[in-house]
Image (cartoon, rainbow, N blue to C red):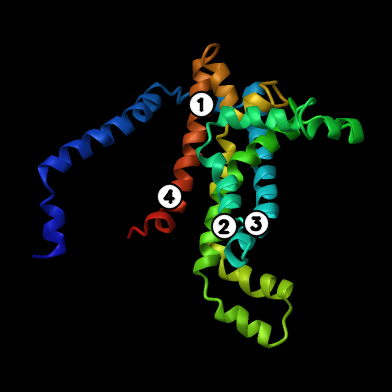
Amino acid sequence: MSDRYRRDRSPLALVVPASLAVVFMALPLVSLLQRAPWSGLPDRLAQPEVAAALRLSLGCSLAATFVSVLLGVPLAWVLARTDLPGAALVRALVLLPMVLPPVVGGAALLFALGRRGLVGQWLEQRFGVVLPFSTAGVVVAETFVAMPFLVITVEAALRGADRRYEEAAATLGAGRWRTFRRVTLPAVRPSLAAGAVLCWARALGEFGATITFAGNLEGRTQTMPLAVYLALSRDRDAAIALSLVLIGVSLTVLVLLRDRWFNLR
């Protein structure tokens, strides 16, 4: 019996709940699209508060992605290539924000980096740096929740990479840093790009940690998800317009990473 026949003869007991699941997941999106103010969409997105939220979201999410790459790639290499004592615990701590409720993450950031926080009070006293309720605080919150997605993607790629090329480079006299730059990074570049895109999309859609740690100040900390939350009670068309932007970004990311995640053809 061919694989094609098996696929075509899917059991009805599986097809029915699968169809219901698709309807359940698609119905809210279809309803949102049905209510979208298509004719006035450009004007909605051009409103000052909406445009400010868009600019702030893009700027902060890109900054969070940059910080995540700067810190996350070395961390992924350490977890994948060294015998770090307590590596399992370190990995669990790094990946914890992926499953931690975002509001809890924001509260933890507040207790750590707030004006009376464990480190925050020292930052203010010594350097005059206050992170809560600031644009920098948005970047910190987004980095906290988004970096694990990059780390786990790059670490998996490093573990699966062929190390013979690195060993050959070392045999030819290349130092560890040069081998990392010229051999290791190019080998995992596709996964690094995928992890960075996923990290950026997660940062762009962050809500709970941002509103808890950075607040919801228009033009300063009000990103697109926060603007959607606020607009739902004031201007639903603006909320729908911003939601469509976020949905578009999410769908684009899923399409770009489809083969890398699921190996579909």
Does 3 sit above or below residue 35?
Answer: below
Q: Extreme right residue here?
A: 126
The residue at which mark 2 appears reads as 193
Q: Is residue 238 left or right of residue 259?
A: right
When asked about the image quadrant of residue 17, the answer is top left
Evaluate whether residue 196 shows in this view.
Answer: no
Identify the mark nearer the N-term, 3 or 2: 3
Distance, label 1 to label 2, CA atoms, is 28 Å
The residue type indicated by label 3 comes to Leu
Split into 4 quadrants, where in the image is the N terminus?
A: bottom left
Of the pair 106 and 47, the residue shown nearer to us: 106
Distance, label 4 to label 3, CA atoms, is 27 Å
The residue at which mark 4 appears reads as 255
Of the pair 83 and 206, the residue shown nearer to us: 83
The residue at which mark 3 appears reads as 75
Residue 108, x across and y down, in percent: 65, 31
Q: Extreme top residue here?
A: 234
Residue 19, x across and y down, in percent: 21, 37
Of circles 3 and 2, the one toward us is: 3
Residue 11, x across and y down, in percent: 11, 46
Of the pair 43 and 34, the residue shown nearer to us: 34
Identify the mark nearer the N-term, 4 or 1: 1
